[in-house]
Amino acid sequence: MGALDLLQGTLDLLILKTLSWGPMHGYSVARLIRERSDGAFLIEEGALYPALHRLERQGWIESDWGLSENNRKAKFYQLTARGRAQLRAEVATWQRYTKAVAGVLEPA
Amino acid sequence: MRRIPGIRRVFRHERGRVERDVDVELQFHIDARTDDLVRLGLGRDEARRAALAEFGDVKRYETETMRIDRGYARTTRIKELLWSVWFDFAYALRGLRRSPGFAAAAVFTLALGIGANTAVWTILDALMRQPLPIDRPNELHAVRRTDQPNEDYLNSFQRFQRLQAVMPDPQQLAAMSAFGRMYATTGDQPEPVLAQLVSGNWFRTLRVGASAGRLIDLDDDRVLDAGAVTVLSDAYWSRRFGRDPRIVGTTIRVNGIPLRVIGVGQPGFQGLTVGSSVDLWVPLSMQHALRYIGNYSAHNADTEKAWAPQDGIQWLILVARVQEASAARIAGALDRQVRGDLEQQLATADSVDRAYQLREHVTLQPIPRGVSPLREQFKDPLRVLMASVGLVLLIACGNLAGLLLARSSARSHEVAVRISLGARRGRLVRQVLTESLTIALLGGALGVVVARWGTAMLLRVASSGARPIPLDVSNDVRVIGFALLVSVGTGLLVGAFPAMRVSRYGLYDAFRGAGRVMGGRSSHRLPLGRLLVMSQIALSLVLVVTAGVFVRTLRNLLVIDPGYEREHVVVARLDIRAAGYDSAALPALYERLLGAAAAIPGVRSASLSLNSLAGGGTRTSGFVVPGRTLPPGESSTAQENYVTPDYFSTIGMTMVAGRGFTRADGVGAPKVAIVSESMARHFFGTDRVVGARFGYDAPPDLEIVGVVKDARVNALREAAPRLVLRPLAQGPREFVTSLEVRVAGPLEPVTAALRSAIHQVDPMLPLRDITPLSDLLERGLTSERLVARLAGSFGVLALLLAAIGLYGVMGYSVSRRTNEMGVRLALGASPGGVRLLVLRESLMTSAAGVVLGLALLLPVQGVTGRLVYGVSPRDPVTVALGTALMLAVTAVAAFVPAWRASRIDPVDAIRSA
């Protein structure tokens, strides 16, 4: 099976979901998305960063400088309360969406 | 100087920070991925290549991320700044609400100060800087003489046409007459209106629009005595016709001639003369039909015939619309034409005269702001008033600064606490400044309202007539801008002193001042406050002395002996020419007028004259004395007037030699004249001229029968002119403009009776006004009166403000030194001694202020020199009086705190410490 193009807005959802497990730096976010999706998405890791900064500007996540596992300076992100609410709303929308699509595609 | 943290805050997201952060973040990602891949067994180089490939275009993502961050940083910065400004503002408002008395007093003081400044500035601005409300005013030029670039240069209609011919486009050059008073009959009585005759292309050249109907155009001004149309000014249309559009197309009678109203000029356009408003415009071709007579000069001409065909009558002011680039070239062409004209006219003149006349050169003078005699009249007075009112505001600022200073030291405990809690000094400074700015802006907002009222009041007071000076002062943007500027300046100035104090605060000072320990010298004596009061006293002294000089100027002018009696005389100004009388009917009319006036109870005598006293109209003629040539450069002219025999006794002119006129000096009798002393001295070199002969031209046909004392017939401020008086009976074609009556008893009943008497002689006789002579003379002193009155009130205000300032500072000082005074009293100082101590301190301050003020007077007096009369701008008496007044008032102001200091109860004072 080939790699999938990521739908618009889906990356934001994936980032929020990933961050819901706890604060982490951008590289961890990338790793986790890659592992959990089995590398199914055709996505350049660089695209993560504009998305992260945009989400921060929206007030859904916030960032702070910290030290990584191997003691290097890294920027850590975490969900804000508003981000958590946003995640819930987006997950609900996503589920309704996939259910509707599935309903149409399922053989009757 | 320390950087103000408010500003540093703006730069916290300094340049490069965003870039560096993004760079570090992305670099970390690639490095971490490389490390992971190495751990999985790849070679380092290979791992790095793979990491980069997975990452994608680093440059692109970096740029995109940075762009997002930069936008974010910008909005955060602005938000933070607005937030902190709002916080300071709210804090200031809270503080003011806690002391409403202080707030109200401060805001009110500044409202008056800023309002007064804005009012004076509005008028100055409208008069000096406002461009004409026409399209591209910078292209408008007046044809003027190079040696008299600010005076009207008059031309004949013939020359106007010759000059039009040398223009690239003849329609670029237009002509207008001086204003003429005419009488419009729109109801049952003729009313005076200000009319101006204009060439058919005048409105076109100016590029003015119409409010209604159309404007005068070329076809209206083609044929002599035809073109009976008129354009009203928007102001006149509003005032007289309530902006009724139906007026267009109707006919009104002007000087008895029916004129069709064809339109109304655009709003705000009142002609080219700023500060006068023309009521209606009429084509030049109507000059003769309307019997227009305005400012003119005539040579070899008959002014009773139509003026347009006569090259000898100069009466037109020429304006041209030319672009700046071609102005010099066109001016050159006009000058060549004028000089060609002159050469031709002077072909027969002698060489001296020729050389004299040929000095004339013309040029194009830009007049984007129009022309204005008012500008010349009020320029200096308004500047002086602007300076005075500015100083008053400065002094008021001083008081406010003093109050804020006292407030800030009263709050020193709060400040100390905040500093110790880590508040940055700059933040405190900003808060102090925000407080003063808040007060100033509130004051400024209220000040705009005050200014609106003040401007209207000034225009009314400055006007010599019944109506306020028509000046367009409605430029709200500029006015509000000015008020805003002054408010901000005031706020910063007022706040500077307490801000300086806060910024110098050490923690130790703050707590020491806040505790009730006996303070050192600096904490209770407010050295800054002293300095403030000293400067206030200095500035007030300047204002008080200047005002004194102006008041004396006005008084000197009011008590001047004009050479006739100004009391007991009433003058009726009329316009017989406009009524359309034939000159043959004049002698009979004059007899009836004199008879009717003399018959009024209370009237002792009555007379008629060609030009009224202090009336503005004068006739100047050239005279020749046989056998005498005046030195070159000396004028050979004298002012001429025609009067009836009782003129001298009616206005109380003094004969110094010879006789007055009698009824025998009639048309057939030998021609006689009465001259003034200065005329005799100028033309004859002696006062003994009775019996001597002179004339207008070569045959000296006038015999001098009497000499009168010099008299200021034109204006109190104007030196007595050389006068030649002729009997009216010997100038039977002269239209008089003035009727004088001498009154025994009260003037009011006679004024009313005179009106109805004239009305009975001819109900359609245009009557301009009936005024006591003293009022007529004082109208000429409007600007002096305005300056004296306003400068006087500013002086008093300044004095009061300075006194309050001193009182405030001394009072504060005494209250802070209560325990010191208590100790002094307890240790045996007498109450009188303590009183003296305080008085001495305040007197030292005011004496220093007075010395500073006297020094400041020196340059100021140079400026006021041109406006004074009969008194030196450094008049020692005024200076001494002003100084004494200043010291006395400050002594009174200091006495209350001194008295309070001496009444301190030592036990209370020491215990409370």
Image (spheres, rainbow, N blue to C red):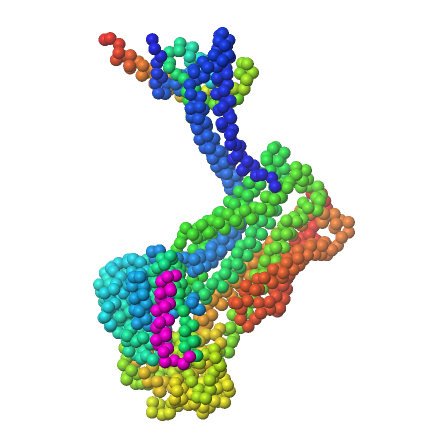
B348 part of magenta stretch: yes
**Magenta stretch containing residue B277, yes or no?**
no
The answer to whether residue B240 of the structure is visible from this angle is no
Q: Position of residue B216 (x, y in %)?
A: 26, 63
- Tell me where residue B360 appears, x and y as whole percent: 41, 71
Q: Does residue B461 appear left or right of residue B536 in this picture?
A: left
Q: How many marks?
A: 0
Residue shown at 47% from the left, 57% from the top? B121
Q: Main secondary structure of the magenta part?
A: helix
Residue B342 shown left or right of residue A24 in the figure: left
Residue B741, image x and y in percent? 40, 81
Residue at 24% in and 8% down:
A107
**As drawn, is B57 to the left or to the right of B201?**
right
Q: Quadrant of residue B886?
A: bottom right
Residue beneath the point at 43% across and 60% down: B127
Q: Is residue A89 above or below residue B631?
A: above
Residue in the foreground of this view, choosing between B200 and B249? B200
Tell me which corner region of the image, top left, top right, bottom left or bottom right, holds residue B66.
top left
Q: Which residues are magenta?
A: B328-351
Taking depth in this image into account, of B364 and B66 the one nearest to the observer is: B364
Locate the C terminus of chain B by quadrant.
top right
Q: B346 or B286, which lies in front?
A: B346
Instruction: Classify B613 as above or below B142.
Output: below
Q: Position of residue B798 (x, y in %)?
A: 56, 58
The answer to whether residue B489 is above or below residue B236 is above
